Image (tube, helix red, strand yellow):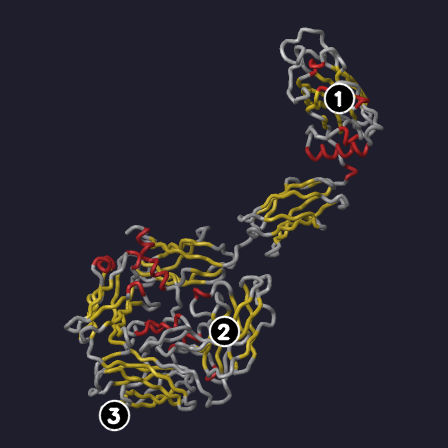
């Protein structure tokens, strides 16, 4: 079988195992009734009967009114469901057994989850999350609710309901949610008047968890929220069936009766609840009982609290064939269910499930034929195959009364792998189980994006069981869980989704690790909250950015002019999470700042009319040089079109190492000779005696913006006349202050090397046109 086939066959197994085993404990083999419907949800619908997993300790058959023999009662020492409860949640002991948390049941007889469990199913335990400051109290008590992970700046409703089928829902109030998704401080509710002693649900918002709360009372006679289950829920006269219940007065008497449709009591018995309020008893249906649906009533004597279930006395029987089937045959031919003893036209429901949940996709109805026989074949699609035990309950469609129940098993020689949940929150855990592995052989479990692995051994029967702990910092997402039988080399895989907040690992990178005040620094980051705000600081704040959907950003910040020179920490704060990323950063002393030599030309493209004339008339192209040695000579040489002579001149830089000169043309007979491209080269020597060469370019264009090549009378064609000169002269420093030149120097330094700054000479130096 291919790996993909293995994956398909396990999808259903993963889904049905997503509910807690405790919640569906009533759907054990031999106890298929009701499929623990109420255990899945507080809104359970009523059904005829159900029972938790049977135990060895129970009452012996009770004598009927007809004089049938019976044995003395032997009370169970412990409620089997209470045992589960004791291991699932609140470990705090109580002196009064009646106040201890215990599983409750709906009227359909199915076992509810432990009263201290936070939700009905682990599938609901992810996000949002909530808790109560106490898990039990009396009517009128105030209970505080805390929670997180809700939609920020909204409100949620608190709703109260008994853990029983069709229980009334009571609005407790509305709780505000703050900007961080937390329930407002002081959120609380009051245990409603009229609440019976027993376990109740507290719904925290429509999408929030369902919490449980145990109502207690100092009054031993206070009415209690009691439950009753029958297992099975149907059988012929003379058959035995079990009755059990919870929520009764600890060590108190429970009066049981079997009452026919006309009100005749055909069976009575008194049972005793154990210290947890749980009881078990076994009835024998009188041999002379007529067919029909009987009420099974249970009355808590001390509190006079009463509930009831049903048992259907019927001659109808269910035959399942085959009772064991290979998975391939299950898909090809299915399992035939035949019910005999019905009346023609009876419509019956075949409800199929396993120990964990009902399987509605395998369930359907059938109508009895003229012989009183109804037949239904359970046959799955390939993706529906669950390897293991199935249970089927047959009931009347109109009344819901149980008719019969039975079991069958689907087997496979392939490796089987089940996860107790298909989703798990960060920091949570799931049970990984399977079968058909090499007995006592080595097994390797691998999961997660980093292929983390753990090794363990299979049991002697070839089954495996391992608790997979999910780290708190596990990244949310869907991962493969692969289990390999090291002996055979076979493996099988299931998908597991980790839920929760993204794991942030903010990191930043600066393009430089030092800069001068006023400099611009580029910063990039990753691992931040998606679409979240990021704030930068070197103490003081220096800027902000918004991360993209991948939690990344690119930004620029300016180093404050007044920031003290020295070592600093550059911090990028993820505003939503409070996580930070830092980098060491040095602010240089401006006194040590050295301006790199640079040349700027303004403008780089000049119209012919503006190029011709004297510099005093604001004509020509201004060249600015910074970063030269103070007082050093520099030479600038300009070459241009064919008809223009090259120009070269030597000048002296000022005390700041700065210089300016202008290049312009003369009034000549054919001005178009100046049209074209020019190159300026500035040479000097630095303090270390190394040659410095700076190059820039500019163009002279016609008034319409077109460029010529400086030849011919109109600037095009071969030039045949005498070459013309251009002139260059240093500008007096009164035209531009050292501060203005310093600004240019700073800008050039920021932009690096000999990068050319675009600046309008007239704006910079106050020239007038």
> Which of 711 and 731 lies nearest the eye of the viewer?
711
Mark nearer the N terminus (1 vs 2): 2
Residue 352 vs 200, above or below: the answer is above
Q: Position of residue 372 (x, y in %)?
A: 17, 73
Q: Is residue 25 visible?
A: yes
For mark 3, what is the residue? 65
Q: Position of residue 260 (x, y in %)?
A: 27, 87
**Under tag 3, what secondary structure?**
loop
Which label sits on residue 435?
none
For mark 2, what is the residue? 159
For mark 1, what is the residue? 620
Residue 682 vs 63, above or below: the answer is above
Report the Cα–Cα distance between label 1 and label 2: 84 Å
Res 765 quadrant in image: top right
Report the Cα–Cα distance between label 3 and label 1: 126 Å
Res 394 quadrant in image: bottom left
Q: Residue at x 49, y 89 (%)?
A: 219
Q: Dot 3, crowdedness within 10 Å: few (<14), some or many (≥20)?
A: few
**Under tag 1, what secondary structure?**
loop
Nearer the observer: mark 3 or 1; the answer is 1
Mark nearer the N terminus (2 vs 3): 3
Image quadrant where one finds the C terminus: top right
> Which of 570 and 204 lies nearest the eye of the viewer?
204
Mark nearer the N terminus (3 vs 1): 3
Res 465 quadrant in image: bottom left
Q: Position of residue 204 (x, y in %)?
A: 50, 70
Residue extending farthest front: 704
Q: Position of residue 336 (x, y in %)?
A: 20, 65
């Amino acid at each position: 079988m291919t790996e993909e086939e293995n994956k398909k066959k396990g999808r259903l197994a993963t889904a049905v195992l997503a509910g807690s085993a405790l919640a569906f404990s009533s759907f054990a083999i031999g106890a298929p009734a009701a499929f623990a419907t109420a255990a899945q949800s507080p809104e359970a619908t009523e059904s005829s009967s159900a029972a938790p997993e049977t135990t060895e300790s129970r009452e012996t058959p009770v004598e009927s009114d007809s004089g049938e023999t019976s044995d003395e009662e032997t009370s169970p020492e412990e409620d089997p469901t209470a045992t589960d409860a004791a291991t699932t949640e609140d470990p705090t002991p109580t002196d009064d057994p009646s106040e201890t948390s215990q599983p409750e049941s709906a009227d359909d007889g199915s076992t509810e989850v432990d009263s201290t469990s936070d939700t009905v199913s682990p599938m609901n335990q992810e996000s949002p999350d909530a808790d109560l400051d106490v898990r039990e109290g009396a009517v009128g008590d105030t209970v505080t609710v805390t929670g997180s992970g809700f939609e920020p700046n909204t409100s949620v409703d608190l709703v109260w309901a008994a853990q029983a089928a069709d229980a009334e829902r009571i609005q407790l109030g509305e709780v505000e949610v703050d900007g961080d998704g937390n329930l407002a401080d002081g959120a609380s509710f009051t245990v409603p008047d009229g609440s019976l002693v027993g376990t109740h649900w507290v719904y925290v918002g429509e999408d929030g968890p369902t919490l449980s709360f145990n109502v207690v009372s100092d009054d031993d006679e206070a009415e209690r929220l009691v439950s009753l289950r029958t297992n099975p829920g149907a059988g012929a006269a003379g058959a035995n069936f079990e009755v059990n219940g919870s929520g009764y007065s600890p060590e108190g008497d429970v009066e049981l009766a079997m009452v026919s449709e006309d009100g005749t009591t055909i069976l009575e018995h008194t049972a005793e609840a154990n210290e947890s309020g749980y009881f078990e008893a076994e009835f024998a249906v009188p041999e002379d009982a007529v067919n029909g649906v009987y009420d099974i009533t249970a009355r808590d004597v001390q509190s006079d609290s009463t509930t009831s279930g049903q048992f259907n006395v019927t001659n109808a029987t269910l035959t399942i064939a085959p009772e064991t089937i290979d998975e391939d045959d299950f898909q090809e031919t299915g399992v035939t269910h035949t019910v005999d003893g019905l009346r023609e036209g009876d419509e019956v429901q075949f409800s199929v499930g396993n120990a964990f949940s009902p399987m509605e996709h395998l369930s359907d109805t059938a109508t009895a034929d003229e012989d009183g026989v109804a037949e239904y074949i359970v046959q799955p699609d390939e993706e529906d195959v669950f390897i293991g035990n199935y249970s089927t309950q047959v009931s009347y469609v109109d009344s819901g009364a149980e008719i019969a129940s039975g079991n069958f098993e689907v087997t496979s020689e392939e490796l089987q792998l089940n996860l107790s949940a298909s989703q798990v929150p960060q920091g949570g855990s799931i049970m990984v189980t399977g079968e058909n592995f090499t007995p006592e052989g080595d097994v390797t479990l691998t999961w997660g994006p980093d292929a983390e692995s753990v090794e363990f051994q299979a049991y002697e029967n070839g089954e495996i069981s391992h608790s997979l702990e999910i780290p708190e910092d596990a990244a949310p997402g869907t991962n493969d869980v692969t289990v390999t039988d090291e002996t055979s080399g076979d493996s099988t895989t299931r998908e597991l989704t980790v839920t929760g907040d993204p794991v942030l690992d903010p990191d930043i990178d600066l393009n430089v690790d030092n800069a001068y005040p006023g400099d611009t620094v580029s910063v990039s980051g990753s691992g931040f909250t998606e679409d979240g705000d990021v704030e930068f600081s070197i103490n003081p704040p220096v800027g902000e950015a918004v991360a993209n959907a991948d939690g990344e950003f690119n930004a620029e910040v300016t180093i404050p002019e007044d920031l003290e020179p020295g070592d600093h920490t550059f911090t990028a704060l993820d505003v939503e999470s409070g996580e930070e990323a830092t980098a060491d950063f040095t602010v240089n002393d401006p006194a040590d700042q050295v301006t790199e030599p640079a040349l700027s030309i303004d403008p780089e493209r000049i119209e012919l009319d503006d190029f011709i004339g004297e510099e005093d008339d604001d004509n020509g192209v201004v060249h600015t040089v910074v970063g030269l040695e103070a007082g050093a000579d520099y030479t600038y040489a300009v070459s241009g079109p064919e008809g223009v002579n090259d120009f070269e001149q030597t000048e002296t830089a000022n005390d700041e190492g700065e210089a300016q000169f202008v290049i312009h043309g003369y009034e000549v007979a054919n001005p178009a000779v100046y049209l074209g491209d020019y190159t300026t080269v500035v040479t000097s020597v630095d303090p270390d005696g190394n040659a410095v060469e700076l190059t820039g370019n500019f163009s002279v264009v016609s008034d319409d913006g077109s460029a010529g090549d400086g030849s011919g009378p109109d600037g095009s064609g071969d030039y045949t006349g005498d070459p013309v000169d251009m002139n260059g002269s240093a500008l007096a420093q009164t035209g531009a202050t050292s501060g203005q030149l310093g600004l240019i120097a700073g800008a050039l330094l920021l932009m690096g090397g000999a990068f050319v700054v675009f600046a309008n000479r007239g704006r910079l130096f106050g020239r007038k046109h």
